[in-house]
Amino acid sequence: MRRLHGVRLPHYKQTSDMAFETLPLPEKVVIPMSMHMGKPCTPTVKPKQTVAVGECIGTSDAPFSADIHASVSGTVQAVTDLRLMNGTVCKAVEIEPDGLQTPFAGLTVPTYSDRKEFLAALRRSGGVGMGGAGLPTHIKLDPPKKIDFLLINAAECEPYITADDRTMQEKPLTILKGIRRIMQVLDIPECAIGVEENKPDAMKIISEAAAKDPAITLVPLPPVYPQGAEKVLIYHITGRTVEEGKLPADCGVIVMNVSSIAFVEEYFSTGMPLVERGLTVDGDCIGKRCSLQVPIGTPIRNVLDYAQCDYEKLDRLISGGPMMGQCLPGIHHPVTKTMNAVLALSEAEKRRTTACIRCGRCIQACPHRLMPTELEKAYQKRDAVRLEELKLQICMLCGCCSYVCPANRPLAETNGLAKAFVRQQKEAAK
Ligand code: SF4
Ligand code: SF4
């Protein structure tokens, strides 16, 4: 099969052999009411109210949403406004922990007798895609079409990040049980787990755990970024193409992140909603790089202190990887459900931008063979029609073009701005 284009990146997977440690409880958590695609939740608690771990503190009537739960036991201090990484503002619940981590008494192990009850239980779990997208899991597992292939995304192709790798090494049986549960409830006959070959320990552990199950295959993938992009992964593993404007379900596939699968299984085994997540902490300002289990809502400052961050050198804080991650607005921003890494980088990693030398490398590197230079020009002219002609809409913002550019032009970032511009134009025309 023809392989899509991409780039070979340095891996920097230095935390691959570092087991998850538990971060000491912070002095407060700040839990945003929007950590998912869809409608933000409305807080259901008030200041001075005591809460327990796993208690629902935010919900929404909208079907496209995911409940939010307390990650610590303690007392609600305030319901405030919080600016998110995308610039929008949402409500957030501040809780002062009591240090006891008392589980909510109302939690029960979910039971179900059919798909409808399974999805209703998932809705109460607060589960979302933990690889970064944040699609509520009960929506993802309720596709409008018949699915015949479950694809587990364990590529983790961005440099530095090893949260999925660690989850595979530490929870292989949970992952396999979760896969079988979903295959059984959704009546899916076949599953593949796509893993980049730069994770030999995880591959060995998962393939041993899956050895006796012919319906589940582990597929090693060459470490060519963006191997973990949904459409790229579907094409490389199944040979199916997701047409422009279509969803994976349109070609019979559901793609799930491997850590999300582990969460689903833990939820159906314990009844504990999504209240913590695994995080890679790395970068050249970090003195003690590590893998951490962190309560949702923990201020990044606590994570950085634990990892012995050199604040004097610190220039940029990134949530996620260096290719597609987002700059964090500050050290007080909380850990969210979709945050899989915190990178603390110094000025030394910045590159100077110069004029385009028309080398064409950006086009060669683009998995969709888009023309980033033309997109850049069209955005500079604010030409929405030309941007659409150039297929801006299929750009994944993967960053391959920016990475290979010898002039260090911020091509992917420009495409991100261009997408926002086109969206605004369409809204204004309604
Ligand atoms: S960011 Fe967009 S234009 Fe650049 S390589 Fe990725 S898909 Fe292509
Ligand atoms: S890779 Fe950079 S320098 Fe080369 S054509 Fe693209 S934008 Fe210009």
Image: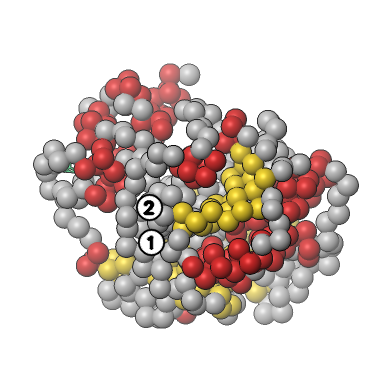
Above/below status of 56 relative to 115: below
**Camera-side residue of 274 and 269:** 269
**Camera-side residue of 349 and 299:** 349
Crowd band around label 2 with a 10 angstrom C-alpha radius: few (<14), some (14–19), many (20+): some
Residue 224 tag number: 2
How are the colours assigned in the image? secondary structure
Q: Position of residue 290 (x, y in %)?
A: 47, 76
Helix, strand or loop for disc 1: loop
Above/below status of 418 relative to 29: above
Residue 222 in the figure: left or right of residue 408: right
**Residue in the picture at 88% in, 47% down:** 113
**Ligand 2's quadrant:** top left
Q: Position of residue 238 (x, y in %)?
A: 54, 41
Helix, strand or loop for disc 2: loop
**Residue in the picture at 74% in, 68% down:** 52
Q: Name the residue carrying label 1.
A: 159
